[in-house]
Amino acid sequence: MALVLLDRVRESTTTTGTGTITLAGAVAGFQSFSAIGNGNQTYYTITDSTAGTWEVGIGTYTSSGTTLSRTTVLSSSSGGSLVSFAAGTKDVFVTYPAGRSVYKDTANTYTVQQAFDALTANSIALTTGTITTAPVSNTDIVNKQYADAIASGIHFHEAVALATTVALPANTYNNGASGVGATLTATANGALSVDSTLTIVAERILVKNEVAGANNGVYTVTQVGSAGTPYILTRATDFDTVGTGVDQIDEGDFFLVTSGTANVNTAWVQQTAPPITIGTTALVFQQFSAPITYTAGTGLNESPAYTFNIANTGVTAATYGSGSQVPVFAVNAQGQLTTVTNTSIAIAAGAVSGLAASATTNTTDAGNISTGTLPSGRLIGGYTQVTGVGTLTAGTWNATTIDSAYGGTGFSTYTTGDLIYTSATNTLSKLPIGSTNQVLTVVGGVPAWAASTGGVTSFQTSLNGLTPSTSTTGAVTLAGTLGVSSGGTGQTSYTDGQLLIGNSTGNTLSKATLTAGSNITITNGSGTITIASTGGGGGSANPEATNGIYVNSNTISTSYTVASGFNGMSSGPVTINSGITVTVANNSRWVVL
C-alpha cells in the first residue's frame, strides 16, 4: 500500500451517508481514480455544492466495485467527522491538504506544516536540526543531551553473570508487591540457558529482550528448571524499587556482564527515564561498552601493552654444525628450539666387529670385512665382496630367486590357483589350476588334473516307505514316510489326544482317540489326555466286594445329579450333609432301599 498523489483525478458519486463512496466515472477532462492503483491511498475531497457539505481525508481506492473508502477524515463541514452526504451528485477528486504539504518559498526554505510520523530516505544531509527523542533501537540517532546524560548520570550496580540475547522461553510475569519479589516463571518445564550458558541458582541475570519491555530488569535465578520443573527468576533486590539510590531502578543504571558467549565483558545502561512504574513501564537497556582483553599465550609475551613478541628461548643466534660436528637440538611443544649444542662426529672401532685394520678409516669398503657381525644400518649400498652371509632376520631380499635347497621355491612369479608339488628329489614344480569339473588325480606318480568320470550311478535303501531320487550327480534326496517295519510310524500328522494303536493285521499302527463312558469326561490337550468323572454319590466310588456285594457310603458329602436317561440306587439309611443336594432329572429315579 502506498500514498499516491496525481493531477486531474476527479469523478462523481451519488453515494449517500457516511460509508464507502462508489465512484460513477471520471468527469470530462479528468482521470479516474483507477490511476491511483488498486489498494493504494490518496488524499481526497468530496463536495456537495447543493447542500454545501464537504470532507477532506485519506481514502483507499479499490478497483473491484470502483470504490473509495473514507479511511481517515482530516477536516470536514461536520467538525472533522464523517459527513452524512444527502442524495444527489457529489464531486470526488484528489487534493493536497495544506496541513500535510511541504513547500519551498522564495528564500529556498522548505516549510513542513506538521511533524512527520516517519520519513524514509536513501540519503540525507542536515546542517542543523533538533532531535528531541531518546534512542530506542541500536540504529537510532542520539542527541547531545542523551550522550551527556550517559556520561554524567551512570549509576554502577553489582555485575551480572549473564545477559539475554533474545527473549526468554515463554513465561508468566508476577509483579509481586509493586516489583518486590516479582517473578518470571516458565510456562513449560526445562532448564534455563542464557547466552548459550546453563544458569545456576542465585546467579544474577540481565533480562533485556522481553517482548513485554516492562518485564525487563535484573533477576536472580531462584530455580534453574529441569525436565519436571520450570525455571523461576526473581527481581534482584538492587533492582526491584524505583528511585535515585544506588540500589534502585533509575535512568543510567550500569551493569557489567562477566560470563556468557556473545555478551561476556560487555556493559549495559538502563535508558528509561522516570517516572517508572515497575511491571508497567518498559525498561530499555543499551550497550555501553565491550572491553577487549588481550592475553599472551604460550611462547609469547606482551610488552609493551597490546604488543606481542615471541619469547626468547635462550638459544644464541649462530650457525651450528660443520664437517666434523653435528648440531643436537631440544624442541618444546610450540616447535621452538630451547637449546642447541654441537657434538663431534666419532664412530668407535668397537662399534663394528670383524673389521680389518683399516676399518677405522674406511668402513665403506666391504673388502675390509671378512667375518663378524655388523650392527643394524652399517651395511648400506651395493657390495660385491661380502661372503659368508648368515641368517637374515630383517630387511628386504633383492637378490636372485632362492632355490629349494635354501628353503625357497625357485619361483618368482605365480598365477592364481597354482599348486606347488615335488616332481623329483629336492625339486619343486608348479601345477596350474584345472578347468571346471576336473578332479585332481595322479599320473606317472605326480599330481595332474583330469576330467571327472565318476558320480552317483545308483542308490538303494531298504527303509520301508523311503524312495531315493534318481539324480546321478550332486545330492541324492530320500522322500516318503518311514514305515513301521523300519522303525517308523507310517504317520506324518496328529491331532491332540490321538494314540497309535497296533494292528497285527498288516503289522501297522493306526491313529485313534479314547471314547468317554458313562459319567466320564475325556479332555484332549497338546500332549495330554485328561480323564475325569462327571459326579459321585457319596464322595467315593462304589466298590464291589469279592463276594458280589456292592457297598455305598451311608453319608452323601458331595452334590450329585442323576442325569436324564439314568436311574440311581443307594442302600439306606443315607444321610445328606448340610448344603449338599442330590438332583434327579425328569423321567429319572433315585431309589434308597
Image: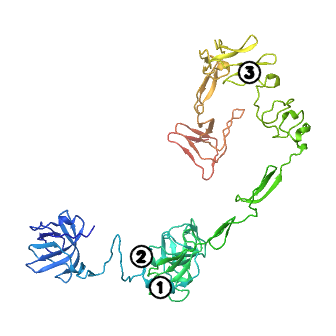
> In front here: 527 or 26?
26
Could you tell me how far apart the alpha carbons at marks 3 and 2 are, in whole angstroms? 92 Å
Callout 3 touching callout 2 (CB < 8 Å): no
Q: Secondary structure at mark 2?
A: loop
Amino acid type, mark 2: Asp
Residue 517's place in the image compared with 470, above or below, is below
The residue that appears at 56% across and 43% down in the rendered structure is 561
Q: Badge 2 local density, few (<14 within 10 Å), some, or many (20+)?
A: few
Nearest to the observer: residue 92 or residue 388: 388
**Which of the two discs, 3 and 2, labels the residue nearer the N terminus?**
2
In the rendered structure, the answer to whether residue 199 lies left or right of residue 214 reads: right
Left/right of residue 348 with respect to residue 568 in the rendered view? right
The local secondary structure at tag 3 comes to: strand
- Is 279 or 380 nearer to us in this picture? 380
The reply to whether residue 57 is in sight is yes
Identify whether 335 is placed above or below 437: below
Per the image, the residue denoted by label 1 is 148
Q: Residue furthest front?
A: 323
Q: Are marks 1 and 2 in contact (CB under 8 Å)?
A: no
Sort mark 3 into few (<14), some (14-19) or many (20+) by Cα contacts within 10 Å: some
- Residue bearing the label numbered 3: 420
| Residue at image mark 2 | 140
Q: 132 or 447: which is nearer to us?
A: 132
Please tell me which residue is depicted at 13% across the width and 80% down the height of the picture: 53
